Amino acid sequence: MKRFFTIIFISFLASHFNLNAQVTKVIDVKISKEELKLYDLIMSYRKSKNLSAIPLSKSLTYVAQEHCKDLSLNKPDLGSGCNAHSWSNKGKWTACCYTPDHKQASCMWNKPRELTNYKDDGFEIACGSSDPMYKEFVMSADYAFESWKGSFHHNNVMINADIWKDSKWNAIGIGIYNGFAVVWFGKSLDLDGEPLK
């Protein structure tokens, strides 16, 4: 009898507190024309460097779009020392202030696992600012792409150069929203497929 109640109690805990249940996150993602343009710009650039195209990822696009919205609406990049890789405490994710010393890098890398079924790290390049002087600025695919091309570190992520030369990108996600553009890169394929076009 004691064993029976123990099994029932463990089953109750597992069902109510997800002790052994895997959470499945269902996401419905559509990529905009401007986001698709940014994807095409990056793929054309990679092709010019004899690099392969990266499959669009539903999961990483979801993360990119959510991050752009968080940056625009909640402005975590305005915290002391925080930059555009930061996340607010106003969503279903772990908040973090991403500083130039990269001490919070794992908080950013983990976002695909926090928000989607994607099981690998994600690596982000971001463009935009919540600074009030940019409040009228409209982000475009062309502006973000040219900004990243002109930045040593961002450019290296796009074309697998320098510290990224041994990485193979098998997934990419694109987000553009209200003055921000972000792109996420992942080494694993996204088993959830591509976003809707």
Image (spheres, rainbow, N blue to C red):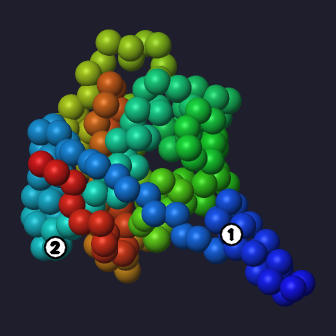
Task: Indicate the quadrant where residue 34 lies.
Answer: top left
- Residue 4 figure quarter: bottom right
N-terminal of the pair, mark 1 or mark 2, is 1
Name the one closer to the observer, 162 or 120. Answer: 120
The residue shown at (21%, 45%) is: 30
Percent x, y of residue 150 = 29, 45
**How many residues crowd around disc 1 within 10 Å: few (fewer than 14), some, or many (20 or more)?**
few
The residue nearer to you, when weighing 178 against 128, is: 178
Label 1 vs label 2, nearer the camera: 1
Q: Amino acid at mark 1?
A: Ala
Task: Residue 5: give x, y in percent of width and height.
Answer: 83, 78
Q: Nearer the viewer, residue 117 or 176?
A: 117
Q: Residue at x 64, y 74 (%)?
A: 20
Judging by the rendered image, the residue that carries numbered circle 2 is 52
Residue in the image at 53% along x and 57% along y: 114
Which three-letter amino acid code belongs to the residue tagged 2?
Ser
Q: Is residue 41 visible?
A: no
Q: Position of residue 178 (x, y in %)?
A: 32, 25
Q: Which residue is mark 1?
A: 14
